[in-house]
Image (spheres, rainbow, N blue to C red):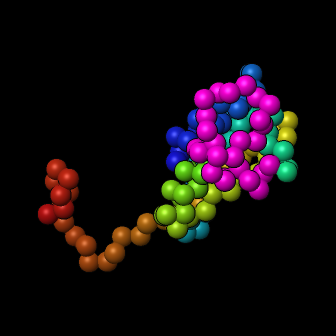
Amino acid sequence: MAAILLDNAFKYVDEGGTVAVRLAQEGKRAVLEVSNTGPGIAPADLPRVFERFYRCDRARPDDGSYGLGLFIARTIVEEHRGQLTAASEPGVRTVFRVELRCAVPRRGIQGKFNGGKIE
């Protein structure tokens, strides 16, 4: 999921632009933000960017993508009971934000980690 978001950020950043990654804990949630400067996403396209096979700019030359990446990323996040959102100011910046619940170890689990096994 992170690779998909980073791939998109680098694919659509403007020349000389910036790709940024932020990872933080906000309360009981882990937050990952991937942003870039560039053309952004038009307001009319924003609600649809996570749809399967949806591509915002049909006028762009074929770059070999099929419009599946963001759909797959959102599916992964939702399977982990998280949320993936997008915000964009066209011509300025686009941000994809992932929120996941932080894992909390259960009480009473003890042991040593040895070669892929908990003993």
Q: Is residue 103 above or below residue 97?
A: below
Q: In this view, which residue lies farthest toward the top?
A: 16
Q: Position of residue 109 (x, y in %)?
A: 25, 73
Q: Quadrant of the C terminus?
A: bottom left
Camera-side residue of 61 and 88: 61
Vertical comparison of 8 with 60: above or below: below
Quick check: is 91 in the magenta stretch? no
Name the image quarter holding residue 94.
top right
Q: Is residue 51 magenta?
A: yes
How many numbered marks have been drawn onto this rendered protein structure? 0
Of 38 and 30, the residue lying toward us: 38
Residue at image position (22%, 70%) is 110
Q: Is residue 39 left or right of residue 119?
A: right
Q: Which range is magenta?
A: 45-69
Question: Which of these two is toward me, 57 or 46?
Answer: 57
Task: Identify the residue at horizontal 84%, vertical 44% (top origin).
Answer: 42
Residue 38 position, x and y percent, is 78, 33
Q: Is residue 99 visible?
A: yes
Residue 40 lies, with reference to residue 76, above or below; the image says above
Determine if residue 18 is in view. no
Q: Tell me where residue 117 appears, x and y as whole percent.
A: 18, 58
Residue at 41 percent of width and 70 percent of height: 104
The residue positioned 58% from the left and 44% from the top of the image is 69
Q: Is 69 displayed left or right of 114 in the figure?
A: right
Prevailing secondary structure class for the magenta stretch in the rendered image: loop
Where residue 99 sits: x, y (%)?
Answer: 59, 60
